[in-house]
Image: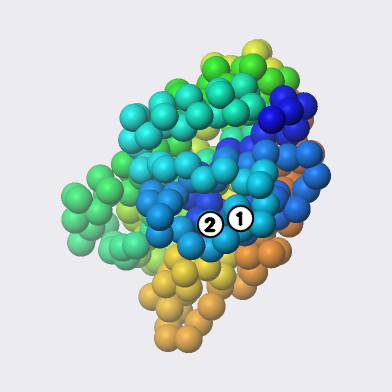
């Protein structure tokens, strides 16, 4: 495999927004995409995509699993020798409670997947990113992670587990930026919008009522996100950006 191809890593690439990103990247010439799934044998859509696009490689990755992340890094090292862009997309939002009712295990499960998972990825993929010049590490966040904006825009929404974990993820991204921007790393959280995926529809029906759907399509979000990621420069690093070109407050 040519080391001149642009190498992407997309976690949670088997469904929803992640699958949309992988599908869009697969159409680009001279690219190699490493897409992860918790159980590749059940990632039927991703398997179908990979069969018709030999530039797509499917890797097993349970979020926050150090052994899975190490195995993925070893495979990538043998395949391309490096990574240009990592999109830490895998995340969960499956519980809706207010502060008084949030079970401890809900908070812990969201932090495990949404915070620890991306950090483990950075720790294990860092040498692969450093082997290339692009060095972009992007974490998929949410508008609910904005401490300033959430009380104004989402007052009363019972999303403490999800929102808190994504705010912590933003902090992780900011710290990685501060520690590695002098090495040429471009690191930032990216708000994909409220996207019409299974996860997004569950949120819409829970918060807004039966039959309600999020306002942003997968295609709109993916197009906007990739435009931001493609155009990201050193000035983008350490900022909280959005798929629509806006910058969000922390």
Q: Residues within 10 Å of mark 1 (few under 14, many from 20)?
A: few
**Secondary structure of the residue carrying numbered label 2:** helix
* Quadrant holding the N terminus: top right
Quadrant the C terminus occupies: top right
Q: Position of residue 185 (x, y in %)?
A: 65, 22
Q: Which residue is denoted by mark 2 in the rendering?
A: 47
Tell me how far mark 1 sits from mark 2, CA to CA.
6 Å
In front: 87, or 156? 87
Q: Quadrant of residue 156?
A: bottom left
Name which residue lies at 70% across and 49% down: 25
Is 69 left, or right, of 235 in this rendering? left
Q: Residue furthest top?
A: 182
User: On the picture, is 172 further left or further right than 62?
Assistant: right
- Kindly indicate whether the residue at mark 2 contacts the one at mark 1 (C-beta within 8 angstroms): yes
Residue 51, position as x, y percentages in the image: 61, 55
Q: What residue is at 64 percent from the left and 17 percent from the top?
A: 131
| Point 50% across, 38% down: residue | 170
Residue located beneath label 1 in the image: 51
Residue 185: tell me if it is visible: no
Residue at the extreme bottom of the image, as rendered: 211
């Amino acid at each position: 495999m040519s080391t001149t191809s642009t190498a992407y890593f997309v976690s949670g690439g088997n469904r929803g927004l992640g699958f949309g990103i992988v599908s869009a990247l697969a159409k680009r010439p001279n690219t190699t995409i490493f897409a992860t799934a918790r159980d590749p044998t059940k990632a039927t859509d991703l398997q179908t995509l990979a069969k018709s696009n030999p530039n797509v490689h499917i890797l097993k990755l349970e979020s926050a699993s150090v052994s899975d992340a190490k195995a993925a890094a070893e495979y990538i090292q043998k395949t391309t020798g490096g990574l240009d862009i990592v999109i830490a997309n895998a995340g969960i939002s499956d519980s809706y409670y207010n502060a008084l009712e949030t079970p401890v295990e809900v908070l812990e499960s969201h932090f495990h997947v949404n915070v620890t998972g991306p950090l483990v990825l950075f720790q294990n993929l860092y040498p692969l990113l450093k082997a290339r010049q692009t060095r972009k590490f992007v974490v998929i966040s949410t508008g609910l992670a904005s401490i300033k904006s959430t009380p104004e825009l989402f007052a009363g929404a019972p999303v403490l587990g999800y929102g808190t974990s994504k705010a912590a993820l933003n902090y992780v991204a900011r710290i990685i930026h501060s520690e590695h921007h002098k090495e040429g790393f471009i690191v930032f959280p990216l708000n994909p919008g409220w996207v019409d995926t299974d996860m997004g529809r569950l949120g819409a029906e829970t918060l807004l009522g039966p039959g309600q759907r999020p306002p942003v399509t997968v295609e709109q979000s993916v197009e906007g996100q990739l435009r931001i990621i493609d155009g990201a420069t050193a000035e983008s690093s350490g900022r909280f950006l959005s798929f629509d070109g806006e910058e969000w407050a922390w």
